[in-house]
Structure formats: C-alpha cells, structure tokens
Image (cartoon, helix red, strand yellow):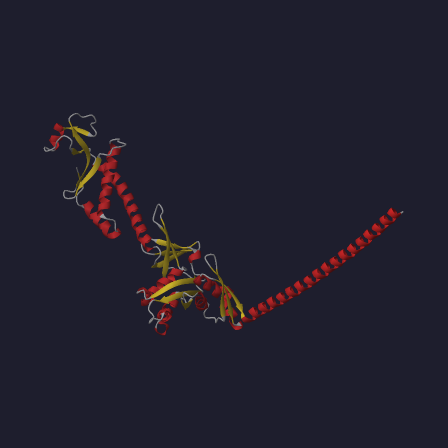
C-alpha cells in the first residue's frame, strides 16, 4: 500500500466546494489512474481482475488482483491454490475469490505522475458535464448575464460559468451592446463540444416577452391568465394574445397593471419596444379583429378554414388602411403570425371598386353571351334556309327527270 495521507481528501473536499465536483468522482479517478499506471508498468494490455482500493481511514492506496481459489492452478494471473490463499485469509475455501495486493515497490512516483494526468483530465470532464447539465436545464429559459465583448458581430455574454454567444441574427437591430452592461437573454441552444459546452443565447426571441410577463404579472404565474400566442419583431413591435380562465379577471387589464405599471416595466426592459396586448378568442373573426388593433375593422369574411389553409378578407375604413397594414406591412404581418391566419386587407372604397368592376365584368359577359347567341341563331337560320332551298332544287330536278322518262316511254 502507498501512504498518501489526508491531504488528498482535503483537496477533494475543496474541489467539491469550489467547483461542485463530488469527492467520489475524484477518488474514483485516482483509483482508475492507479490501475492504468500498474498495467502500463507491468506491460499488461487487458485484465479485468485488477483494481485499486483506497482506505480513507489509513490514507493508503494499493493495487489488488482478484483471484479464484482452486485445487490446481491453470492460470496464475486469475487463480490461486488453497494453501497460498490461506496465508492471506485463513477462512477462505475452494471456489472463493480473494484480493491479493500486487502494488510494486517504488511505485509511488510512477503512480503519482499517472494520477496527475488522469485526475486533471477527469476534473475537466466533470466540469464540462456539470456545465452541460446546468445549461441543458436552462435551455428554453431566461437568464441574466454580463456583456463581455463583441467579436465578429457576435456578442459574448458571461452567464455564470461560461461565456455564451449571441449571434447577429439573435440581436435587436440598432441595439448597442456595451461591455460591462447587464443583459437578460434567452438560452436558445446548448451544443456539446470537446471542451466546455457552447451556449447560444438570444436577445430577440419571442419567449423573452413571455418570461417577462410571467415575472411581472402574478395572474399569469398563478395560471389565471394564459398567454396563447406571441409574435415579435424585436426592437420594433410585439403582439401578445392573452386569455383569462376566470370570468371576473380581465386578461388585458391584468397584463397592463394599475396605471400601466406592469406593461411599462416590460416596455422599459425591452428598450421601449411597442407591445400590443390583444384578447384571445375561439371565434376566428373576433380574434382577427382583436389582432389587427389598434385599427378599426368593418368586416371579416372567412375565405378558407380547413386543415390546408386559413384565409380571411378584412375590410377597414379608408382612413384605417395604412394603420391596419402598418409600416412596411408590420401590423398585418404580426397579426398573421399571432393568429395563424392569412389576412388580406382592403379599404371600403377598394372593395366597392372591386365589386363594381365585378358587376361590369358580369354585364359585359352577359352581353357577349347574348350577342354570341344571336349570331348562332342567325347562322342556324341561314343554314336551314340554304338546306330548304337545296331541297326544293333537288325536287324540281327530280320532277324534270321523271317527265323526260315518261315522254320517252310514250314515244
């Protein structure tokens, strides 16, 4: 046995406190290192009956080989005679297994070098697994970090034990990310690598809005108010559809808060991004009307509602058309994402013009049909007259031929 003292256990306890790596993992790593060093020292490639045992009370560690007690030894590496076994343990019998210490002399230095390499590697693996497990649990949640730097348009954010990456597409357009500032981000993905895991975070994800509402609105956290859908164009505008499970609780009012205190906190967190809170409805017409707020709607006509398509035609007042569509189509685009319906918007005058055009097209088509019919009738009548005239001519020719034949017979 090799005396290692109590320093190892103290070091293991310290690592457990500082890095969260359990003492059992470190001790198991040390034992594995002893076995690997012994096999290398003795030039043994494969052996399943070799193990290292650490006695925590005495602070000693040694390499042991398990052998089977037999009458006749056929393999000295795995078997031992009864007499030899009784020298180690008196109560041993045939068929028992016995552990025999095989720690070489002057093995301490070799074992120490091997143990250092293995333990260092195991510590890194344990740290990587701990970080991986921690952030796998955080995946899909909101966390707070500190901006470290900007590299190749990627923002590096420290979120605890690791520096996460915020790609350009996950950043808010026009936002300035200053190193040292605290930032709330959404853990988008965690990728396992040979070193520490790579964590991808987002500052533009729609779930950030959901998390903020859950933090600020107690009714949402308690399940009284539900967030049914969110559509967001980060940095510009967000629409959120909410529903109340309690008839006495106003879902929109709960999210706005007394004098707008709750929504104002969220807007400030999102750097004054506009937020439209709309009331969810099972009725698609009502839901579409709510989703297009703040514009007023005259009518909604459902064009298709099946498993393949959801389409609606919305008519708005002339002075509300630009508001309903939004700048560069933003309002109707967000309403489409929120409801899942394809929305075509027209003003009242556009619809009247389209209807008038349809009527004119119908009248023109009707006139064309009447004209075509009259032409066909004239052509048919002309064909009938021609056939009748031809028939009369044929009859006259027939009569003349008959008269001639009769005259010839009389002669």
Q: Nearer the viewer, residue 241 or 110?
A: 241
Please state the horizontal and vertical placement of residue 210, each as a whole percent of the image: 37, 62
Residue 3 horizontal side relative to residue 303, left or right: left
Q: Nearer the viewer, residue 207 or 332?
A: 332
Please state the horizontal and vertical placement of residue 214, each as a whole percent of the image: 34, 64
The image shows residue 164, relative to residue 336, as above or below, that is above
Q: Can see residue 79?
A: yes
Please state the horizontal and vertical placement of residue 245, each as a whole percent of the image: 34, 67
Which residue is rendered at x = 22% and y = 47% of the image? 23
Q: Nearer the viewer, residue 272 or 310?
A: 310
Which residue is rendered at x = 20% and y = 38% of the image? 52
The quarter of the displayed image where residue 96 is located: top left
Which residue is rendered at x = 30% and y = 53% of the image? 134
Residue 405 horizontal side relative to residue 242, left or right: right
Please state the horizontal and vertical placement of residue 403, each as a whole percent of the image: 85, 51
The image shows residue 162, relative to residue 211, as above or below, that is above
């Amino acid at each position: 046995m090799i005396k290692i003292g109590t320093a190892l256990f103290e070091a293991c306890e310290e690592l457990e406190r500082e890095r969260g790596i359990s003492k059992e993992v470190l001790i198991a790593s040390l034992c594995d290192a002893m076995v690997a060093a012994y096999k290398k020292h003795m030039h043994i490639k494969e052996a399943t009956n070799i193990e290292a045992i650490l006695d925590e009370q005495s602070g000693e560690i040694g390499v042991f080989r398990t052998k089977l007690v037999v009458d006749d030894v056929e393999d000295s590496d795995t078997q031992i005679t009864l007499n030899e076994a009784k020298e180690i343990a008196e109560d041993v019998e045939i068929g028992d297994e016995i552990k025999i210490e095989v720690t070489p002399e002057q093995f301490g230095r070799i074992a120490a070098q091997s143990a250092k390499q293995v333990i260092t590697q195991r510590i890194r693996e344990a740290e990587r697994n701990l970080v991986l497990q921690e952030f796998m649990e955080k995946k899909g949640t909101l966390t707070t970090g500190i901006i470290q730097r900007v590299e190749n348009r990627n923002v590096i954010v420290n979120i605890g034990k690791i520096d996460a990456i915020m790609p350009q597409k996950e950043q808010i357009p026009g936002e300035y990310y200053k190193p040292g500032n605290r930032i709330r981000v959404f853990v988008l993905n965690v990728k396992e690598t040979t070193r520490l895991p790579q964590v991808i975070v987002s500052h533009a994800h729609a779930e950030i809005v959901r998390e903020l509402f859950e933090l600020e609105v107690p009714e949402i956290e308690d399940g009284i108010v539900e967030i049914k859908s969110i559509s967001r164009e980060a940095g510009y505008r967000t629409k959120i559809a909410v529903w109340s499970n309690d008839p006495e609780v106003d879902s929109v009012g709960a999210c706005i808060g007394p004098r707008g205190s709750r929504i104002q906190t969220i807007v400030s967190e999102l750097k004054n991004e506009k937020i439209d809170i709309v009331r969810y409805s099972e009725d698609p017409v009502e839901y579409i009307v709510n989703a297009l707020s703040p514009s007023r709607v005259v009518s909604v006509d459902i064009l298709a509602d099946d498993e393949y398509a959801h389409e609606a035609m919305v008519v708005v007042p002339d002075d509300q058309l630009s508001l309903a569509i939004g700048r560069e189509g933003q309002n109707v685009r967000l309403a489409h994402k929120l409801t899942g319906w394809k929305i075509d918007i027209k003003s009242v005058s556009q619809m009247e013009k389209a209807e008038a055009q349809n009527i004119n097209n119908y009248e023109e088509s009707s006139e064309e049909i009447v004209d075509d019919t009259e032409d066909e009738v004239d052509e048919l009548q002309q064909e009938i007259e021609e056939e009748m005239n031809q028939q009369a001519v044929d009859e006259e020719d027939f009569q003349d031929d008959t008269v001639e034949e009769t005259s010839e017979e009389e002669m």
